[in-house]
């Protein structure tokens, strides 16, 4: 056997909690990096704890098992917990009081210079995962895990193969940036025009997010943001209603190209939610929080890069915006663009949980009472926090200044140990005198104003609210600032129906009427990745699997 002084071993660890917090256990395995042979296993039921605590305990157990075999070894730790990997690598802060002592204990097992950490997809961590589940099963029976009763060795062959494979891409499908760039370059050379493939192609790759939709970045940043009127009937407050009630004739409207001034700036690679519930629906009859999407010709606004920052917005570095008007030739779009080898900036878009106004489908924007989350909304916030903590991909959190978003963001931040930054540009539309009213009540009291609002994105609600065109310019400018400020990061944006649907529409380059065909439920997750070459791709839309 090789001497311990020159020995390298792989430690794979995992932990789980059935309830989070709930009955928890961990598993860890020490592997030979060349043969994949299992050198040691460890597992334990630890009582009631969170997923993250169980994962840290699994790490400690794995490191100690490696030390008992080879005290002077170098260790390659592989885990599917992005949180633990980033914190132990020193890139993320450790704020949770239960994790600080465990991280310190893990750091003392081997000198820091002899341990390196790598995030791996869950499917490549099955051996440790099986051990953790065996430990939890044993705890359910009132017993502790015993090696003699373990069947995790059945997975040893898979673990051996995984030990010799190169690291799999950590980003979403189609986001392995080199592969994506090669595909775009090949298509550009062979096809010549974007029309050869068409804008509606979808594809999946090896990653966490199925159903990647690759579309050119919309050049309609000055468009109309049919905000929350776009939510589906089940979406709730008016952030989810208005657009659904627009006349069906709007679908036939033509949409003039808008100013191409605000193009996306590249940013972080994001590994995000793993399953997407995609629903497309026709014009919906939902409540006001969605009320924003009247399908009408959009005005051509000034380039988003030149739009002033909203008052009260926290300072953000100025974005390196590429404006078509500032160069002799517009950057290539879609499949005709040149290779982009940089990682995309990924925004994970989270709609806040329910308020008392949501089930009543009332207009609830930024000009009303600023309601808190209801009991149901608080439960939704905890559920989405648990899901995001389990996925472990969020690096930053930015939220709307409204209370319902702050509360939702706080629930996630508490699980991830991250700070929350408030961004004024993510607030909901100001619905003026319509705040707190149902669509029917607005129809009775302000019929002419409502008709004008549904017919034109430049029309504002009664009493000095915001037009959809105004909101769209605000959202596009906010997007540009954030993609520049968080380049190379995966950012959770906690916001409302209108900003989310606007971001989705712009990323797809879709016409305004597309806003009527998107459902966006309370506490749902969507995601968009932005590339430096001006391309964007929608990764996820209205995922509510964590609420079921």
Image (cartoon, rainbow, N blue to C red):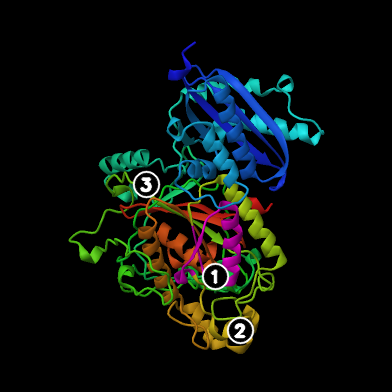
Answer left or right for 406 relative to 46.
Answer: left
Instruction: Give the distance between the C-alpha atoms of the residues marked 2 and 1, in whole angstroms.
Output: 17 Å
Residue 277 in sight in this render: no
Residue 328 in sight in this render: yes
* Relative image position of residue 315 (x, y in whole percent): 39, 68
Of circles 2 and 1, the one toward us is 1
* Relative image position of residue 22 (x, y in whole percent): 73, 45
* Relative image position of residue 63 (x, y in whole percent): 56, 30
Q: Earlier in the sequence, mark 3 or mark 1?
A: 1
Quickly name the residue at label 3.
343
* Circle 2/circle 1 CB separation < 8 Å: no
- Residue placed at 51% from the left, 83% from the top? 461
Instruction: Give the distance between the C-alpha atoms of the residues marked 3 and 2, in whole angstroms.
Output: 47 Å
* Residue at the outermost right position: 142
Quickly name the residue at label 1.
228
- Residue placed at 63% from the left, 72% from the top? 237
């Amino acid at each position: 056997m090789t001497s311990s002084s020159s020995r390298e071993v792989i430690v794979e660890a995992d932990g789980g909690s059935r309830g989070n917090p709930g009955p928890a256990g961990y598993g860890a395995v020490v592997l030979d990096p060349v043969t994949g042979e299992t050198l040691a296993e460890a597992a334990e039921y630890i009582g009631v704890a969170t997923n993250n605590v169980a994962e840290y305990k699994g790490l400690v157990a794995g490191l100690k098992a490696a030390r008992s075999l080879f005290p002077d070894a170098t260790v390659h730790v592989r885990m599917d917990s992005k949180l633990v990997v980033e914190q132990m690598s020193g890139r993320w802060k450790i704020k949770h009081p239960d994790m600080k002592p465990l991280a310190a204990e893990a750091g003392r097992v081997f000198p820091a210079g002899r341990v390196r950490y790598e995030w791996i997809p869950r499917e490549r961590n099955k051996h440790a995962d099986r051990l953790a589940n065996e430990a939890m099963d044993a705890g359910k029976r009132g017993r502790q895990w015993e090696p003699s009763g373990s069947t995790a060795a059945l997975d040893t062959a898979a673990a051996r193969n995984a030990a010799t494979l190169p690291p799999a891409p950590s980003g979403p499908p189609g986001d392995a940036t080199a592969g994506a760039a090669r595909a775009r370059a090949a298509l550009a050379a062979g096809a010549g025009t974007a029309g050869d493939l068409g804008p509606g192609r979808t594809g999946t790759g090896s990653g966490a997010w199925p159903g990647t939709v690759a579309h050119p970045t919309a050049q309609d940043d000055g468009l109309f943001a049919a905000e929350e009127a776009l939510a589906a009937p089940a979406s709730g407050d008016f952030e989810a209603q208005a657009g659904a009630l627009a006349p069906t004739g709007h679908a036939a409207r033509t949409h003039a190209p808008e100013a191409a001034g605000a193009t996306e700036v590249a940013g972080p690679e994001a590994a995000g939610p793993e399953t997407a519930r995609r629903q497309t629906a026709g014009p919906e009859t939902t409540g006001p929080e969605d009320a924003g999407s009247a399908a009408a010709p959009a005005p051509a606004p000034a380039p988003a890069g030149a739009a002033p920052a909203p008052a009260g917005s926290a300072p953000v570095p100025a974005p390196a915006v590429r404006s078509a008007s500032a160069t002799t030739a517009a950057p290539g779009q879609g499949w005709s663009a040149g290779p982009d080898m940089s990682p995309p900036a990924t925004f994970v878009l989270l709609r806040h949980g329910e308020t008392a106004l949501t089930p009543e489908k009332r207009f609830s924007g930024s000009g009303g009472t600023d309601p808190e989350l209801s009991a149901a909304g608080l439960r939704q916030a905890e559920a989405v926090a648990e899901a995001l903590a389990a996925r472990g991909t969020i690096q930053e959190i930015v939220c709307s200044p409204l209370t319902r978003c702050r509360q939702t963001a706080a629930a996630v931040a508490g699980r991830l140990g991250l700070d929350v930054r408030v961004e004024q540009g993510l607030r909901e539309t100001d619905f003026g005198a319509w705040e707190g009213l149902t669509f029917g009540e607005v129809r009775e009291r302000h019929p002419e104003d409502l008709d004008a609002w549904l017919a034109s994105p430049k029309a504002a609600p009664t009493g000095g609210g915001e037009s959809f065109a105004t909101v769209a310019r605000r959202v596009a400018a906010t997007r540009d600032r954030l993609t520049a400020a968080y380049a190379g990061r995966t950012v959770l944006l906690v916001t409302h129906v209108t900003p989310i649907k606007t971001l989705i529409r712009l990323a797809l380059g879709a016409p305004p009427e597309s806003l009527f065909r998107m459902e966006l439920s309370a506490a749902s997750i969507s995601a968009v990745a932005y590339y430096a070459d001006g391309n964007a791709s929608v990764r996820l839309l209205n995922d509510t699997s964590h609420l079921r």
